[in-house]
Image: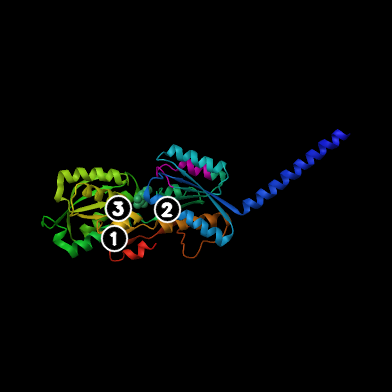
């Protein structure tokens, strides 16, 4: 009898404590949002900046709402297979929201299927999937920019400065801008649009251009430097403009000129407005850049995650286009308006 009573006490206390734990976990869960973030490559300078602003935004949102927000950040290191398995782990580990910086923007199927069957919303960012994929479920979102806008603005920087400085830029004075193009990544929406629209904008303004060379440098400073060193060797002063699909590659081009101890740089233009990119504009090494609002994108992702997890409205200043897209505008940055951006 005494033995049976003892067992019952044990059972009751086990039930009570598990019930309590469940209760506590529930309360904790109610007040905690867990966001899983998978990055295509955590060495990418622009992506690193987005993540650090997300971390700051989390602190701000926590103190604004009293909800604790946990970020679980993983690096897919350029492997879609690795990224797919990170998403599975996020689902198994109870993430409420998943943010994906796709490795292969044409291959989001597995991620969409898994998230959909677990009913966990996905915010894709920076690497844009095709619309048909985003339409596959109503809890899929995309946060980014308007790719072609950045290309157009980069072209406008070149046109404006060419009109102002004329022969200083057209070194051989043949009335044609000889240029080289450093491209980000094959198949990336930003590379495709920036490459095309930057040059088209210059042509449409009535300037004549001639492409001397182009190369893919994977958004990467060191790879761009290597390409540029080669081009300087081959073409030297013939190069009048360097279009770079992002600031890191523009910085790589500058590195190449500095390494060759060439003081007179051609017109070099970038895109992103990273901290290092803005510094190069300040020094006059870069003629200008286009601000890609990574900070705005980071804030939008945290706000959207919060609103999806809590079922609350998005702040007024964030527009959700077609219930799916948040797009932050670009801005031209040159020495004239640099101050606005350095303070950001
Ligand atoms: C672009 C950005 C690049 C690079 C790339 C990665 O928007 O301008 O610097 O970060 O995204 O997807």
Give the foreground label among 2 and 1. Answer: 1
In the figure, 4 relative to 229: above or below?
above
Q: Residue 206 or 131: which is nearer the viewer?
A: 206
- Could you tell whether 323 is left or right of 291 in the image? right
| Extent of the magenta region | 101-115
Please, what secondary structure does the residue beneath circle 1 have? helix
Q: Quadrant of the C terminus?
A: bottom left
| Mark-to-mark CA distance, 3 and 2 | 20 Å
Helix, strand, or loop for circle 3?
helix
Between 133 and 10, the one lying in front of the other is 10
Residue hosting label 1:
282
Give the residue number, with chain letter if any, for mark 2: 50
Residue 11 vertical position relative to residue 209 in the rendered view, above or below: above
Q: State the residue at coordinates (27%, 45%).
A: 224
If you read the primary sequence from the N terminus, does the residue marked by circle 3 or circle 1 appear first? Answer: 3
The image's colouring method is: rainbow
Q: Which residue in the protein does label 3 denote? A: 194
x and y, in percent, of residue 67 in the image: 58, 57
* Mark whose residue sits in front, 3 or 2: 2
């Amino acid at each position: 009898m005494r033995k049976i009573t003892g067992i019952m006490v044990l059972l009751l206390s086990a039930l009570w404590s598990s019930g309590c734990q469940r209760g506590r976990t529930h309360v904790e869960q109610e007040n905690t949002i867990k966001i899983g973030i998978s990055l295509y490559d955590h060495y990418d300078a622009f992506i690193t900046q987005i993540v650090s602003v997300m971390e700051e935004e989390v602190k701000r949102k926590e103190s604004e709402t009293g909800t604790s927000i946990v970020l679980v950040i993983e690096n897919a290191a350029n492997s879609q297979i690795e990224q797919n398995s990170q998403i599975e782990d996020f689902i198994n580990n109870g993430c409420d929201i998943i943010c994906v910086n796709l490795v292969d923007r044409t291959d989001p199927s597995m991620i969409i299927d898994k998230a959909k069957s677990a009913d966990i919303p996905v915010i894709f960012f920076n690497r844009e999937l095709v619309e048909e994929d985003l339409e596959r479920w109503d809890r899929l979102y995309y946060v980014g920019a308007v790719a072609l806008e950045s290309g157009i603005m980069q072209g406008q920087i070149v046109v404006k400065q060419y009109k102002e400085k004329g022969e200083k830029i057209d070194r051989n004075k043949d009335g044609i801008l000889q240029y080289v193009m450093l491209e980000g990544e094959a198949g990336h929406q930003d590379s495709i649009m920036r490459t095309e629209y930057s040059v088209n904008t210059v042509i449409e303004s009535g300037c004549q251009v001639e492409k001397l060379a182009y190369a893919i440098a994977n958004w990467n400073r060191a790879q761009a430097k290597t390409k540029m060193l080669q081009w300087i060797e081959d073409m030297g002063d013939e190069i009048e403009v360097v279009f770079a699909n992002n600031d890191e590659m523009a910085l790589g081009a500058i590195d190449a000129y500095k390494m060759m101890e060439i003081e007179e740089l051609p017109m070099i233009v970038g895109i992103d407005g990273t901290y290092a990119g803005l510094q190069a504009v300040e020094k006059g090494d870069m003629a200008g850049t286009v601000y890609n609002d990574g900070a705005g994108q980071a804030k939008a992702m945290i706000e959207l995650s919060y609103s999806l997890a809590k079922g609350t409205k998005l702040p007024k200043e964030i527009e959700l286009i077609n219930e799916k897209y948040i797009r932050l505008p670009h801005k031209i940055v040159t020495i004239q308006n640099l101050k606005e951006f350095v303070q950001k």
